[in-house]
Image: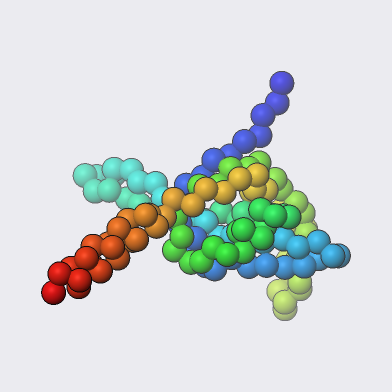
Amino acid sequence: MYSNKVTLIGFLGNDAEVRTNNDRSLTTLSLATKSSYKKDGKYIEHTEWHRCVAFGKLGEFAATLKKGAHIQVEGELRSRKYQPAKVGKKQPDEKTLWEIRVNSILKLDRAAKASAEDDEQSTQEQAE
């Protein structure tokens, strides 16, 4: 039995980027996750950036996400090889890119909290 499942919770570093390739639309997300560890009595933080790709209806939803959105992504880890554009320096012939092929996205932003604050503010305005 094999399993390739990734679950990430983090924040978007940029707005979602939509591309069309051969009549197929895809949305790319740049997701940041953080971890920390203690070294010599100090906490050291490390941020890892993940390239996430969504297709179809999920890609359409992902396209609405903006920088700073707090989300949970589930999918599978994929690698693919590509030829980099030659820019002056000699580069290896082929590079490997790792990305998450997204199966589900869950928004974790506290939209309910924001609307509750708006309701409280409008209640205060009505009292005055």
Relative height, residue 62 to residue 90 (above, below): above
Relative height, residue 38 to residue 85 (above, below): above
Q: Outermost residue, bottom direction?
A: 88
Residue at left offset 30%, top offset 58% = 116
Q: How many marks?
A: 0
Snapshot quadrant of residue 26: bottom right
Q: Outermost residue, right direction?
A: 22
The percent position of residue 68, horizontal first and vertical second, equals 44, 63
| Figure coloring | rainbow
Residue at left offset 81%, top offset 61% = 24
Q: Quadrant of the N terminus?
A: top right
As rendered, which of 107 and 47 lies closer to the eye?
A: 107
Relative height, residue 8 to residue 115 (above, below): above
As rendered, which of 26 and 78 lies closer to the eye?
A: 26
Q: Is residue 33 visible?
A: no
Q: Is residue 89 visible?
A: yes
Q: Quadrant of the C terminus?
A: bottom left
Q: Outermost residue, top direction?
A: 1
Residue at left offset 34%, top offset 61% = 115
Q: Is residue 53 left or right of residue 127?
A: right
Q: Outermost residue, left direction?
A: 128
Q: Is residue 86 left or right of residue 15?
A: right
The percent position of residue 81, horizontal first and vertical second, equals 77, 54
Relative height, residue 18 to residue 111 (above, below): below
Snapshot quadrant of residue 93: bottom right
Q: Is residue 121 left or right of residue 18?
A: left
Residue at left offset 39%, top offset 46% = 35
As rendered, which of 3 and 103 lies closer to the eye?
A: 103
